[in-house]
Image: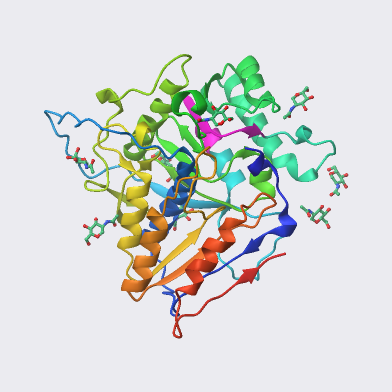
Amino acid sequence: MIMELDNTMDDITQITYVPKEGVKQHVTLRSLILSILFLVFAIAVVVGVTMYCIVSGEEEKEIPSVIKPSLPCQDPCVLSLVESIPENLTFPSGAPSHMSTYSGLQKLISLAQHSIEIASFYWTLLGDDLQYHDNSSWQGEALYKSLMKAGEQREVNIKIAQNKPEPDMASNDTFNLAKLAGAEVRTLDFGRLLGGGILHTKMWLIDRQHFYIGSANLDWRSLTQVKELGAIVMNCSCLASDLGNLFDIYWYLGEPGVTVPKTWPSQYDTNINITNPLSITFNDTMATTYFSSSPPPFCASGRTADSDAIVSIINNASSFVHVAVMDYLPQSQFLNRTVYWPVIDDALRRAVVERPITVRLLGSYWKHTPEQMFNYLHSLETISSHNIKIEVVEIV
Ligand SMILES: *[C@@H]1O[C@H](CO)[C@@H](O)[C@H](O)[C@H]1NC(C)=O
Ligand SMILES: *[C@@H]1O[C@H](CO)[C@@H](O)[C@H](O)[C@H]1NC(C)=O
Ligand SMILES: *[C@@H]1O[C@H](CO)[C@@H](O)[C@H](O)[C@H]1NC(C)=O
Ligand SMILES: *[C@@H]1O[C@H](CO)[C@@H](O)[C@H](O)[C@H]1NC(C)=O
Ligand SMILES: *[C@@H]1O[C@H](CO)[C@@H](O)[C@H](O)[C@H]1NC(C)=O
Ligand SMILES: *[C@@H]1O[C@H](CO)[C@@H](O)[C@H](O)[C@H]1NC(C)=O
Ligand SMILES: *[C@@H]1O[C@H](CO)[C@@H](O)[C@H](O)[C@H]1NC(C)=O
Ligand SMILES: *[C@@H]1O[C@H](CO)[C@@H](O)[C@H](O)[C@H]1NC(C)=O
């Protein structure tokens, strides 16, 4: 938690690991979509390791009597990548540029007619969480105002599922949204539900028709100070309703006193998954898509687990795997007992050893970056050979 608040732009180091040359230049929409989903999954899974738990003696899931086939989605889905770029970080002209996370989220709030559902980690949209004023908090503040207005003036129903705040961090934003904008707020206590972990999902769901999913926290820094990537998808109720099933699970688990059910009731099921992805047209380009989730106890019947999705997408790569994460750590980070968890690390090694593909890994160097991360990255580097190029990029 404190981790993500402790933003020190000055000491970001990026480590790029390039075992082979020849990056495919042609980036198709499909690969873009895959990369963004992969990124989101990767972030989820790195955190998922936190909540790594073995569900022993998992029961056979009841086979549903009616298998709902997922028909191709007819919605005219429009997908835009959105990104936050730290203030004063400027790229050469001609570099790819995307809509800002801020504009994308403002657009989503403006579209809302009935409901805004947000799944979030922590909330610090206002700059007053610091002793001094930083001008770059204005975007977070403006977003907060828009959300407040949507609830107060347009009577949009706002539902917020948030992670249980740390004792030293008042959740002022959600408290005030509840008080003034009629927002319903539920808090998930992973310690109580699973013995550890956090709600790390960042999802905005509008009228169960449009959505944002990505890495940006409800933090003003996530709009102007931290590199974030996400996707905004509009006019896409097929996918939004599946995301709604995930939101409903968080919503249920935010009720006081509930426990994680052994088998989720069928209303949370999905028939869109790794073996049965949804055919969908994004911006006139046909693609197949599904949402995965973690930790596994949060997966209802039919839902693919994040780790399976990530390993599958690595296994399927034919030319490159590019990974951008905050931490890269094939072990538990927040459990009392250290657990080695090499599922993704193994898949990357296997991919690069067995197939002529390029792996590039971008990790972030923060004040709180675990020391072992560098050892693991160097360990990946050492398996490279003479025809394998290693690139280390440091941004100070
Ligand atoms: C899809 O279309 C929208 C609206 O025209 C555009 O903003 C967006 O960048 C497009 N997405 C991609 C991935 O090309
Ligand atoms: C960006 O540059 C402006 C003008 O030099 C400065 O006032 C501001 O503090 C800088 N922002 C950051 C985050 O360094
Ligand atoms: C919450 O609000 C109180 C009172 O306005 C303030 O003292 C405190 O710093 C705020 N906390 C955060 C995290 O913004
Ligand atoms: C911050 O914003 C205020 C008001 O918009 C402006 O007067 C001031 O110069 C800005 N400070 C910096 C360091 O950009
Ligand atoms: C981890 O250790 C702390 C302190 O010893 C304890 O309070 C907590 O319950 C332990 N958590 C788990 C999941 O065992
Ligand atoms: C979504 O659909 C509405 C109604 O058909 C249309 O007006 C709007 O432009 C569409 N949005 C996008 C981003 O294509
Ligand atoms: C995916 O969904 C289909 C259709 O509901 C189901 O038959 C299949 O078992 C699911 N796959 C997984 C891996 O859950
Ligand atoms: C991986 O490739 C197999 C065979 O080409 C395909 O059936 C499967 O859908 C692909 N999976 C993903 C996640 O792209």
* Horizontal and vertical percent position of residue 140: 68, 38
17, above or below 303, in the image: below
Asked if residue 121 is among those painted magenta in the image, a careful observer would answer yes
Q: Nearer the viewer, residue 328 or 288?
A: 328
Residue that extends furthest to the bottom in the rendered view of this protein: 386
Residue 244's x, y, as percent?
38, 31
Asked if residue 80 lies left or right of residue 307, the reply is: right
Span highlighted in magenta in the image: 108-124
| Residue drawn at point x = 33 percent, y = 22 percent | 261
Q: Is residue 254 visible?
A: yes
Residue 25 location, x and y as percent? 44, 74
Quadrant the N terminus occupies: top right
Measuring 80% from the left and 43% from the top, which residue is drawn there? 134
Q: Nearer the viewer, residue 369 or 123?
A: 369
Examine the rendering and report whether any part of residue 97 can be seen.
Answer: no
- Residue 174 horizontal side relative to residue 80, left or right: right
Residue at 43%, 29% in the rendered image: 207
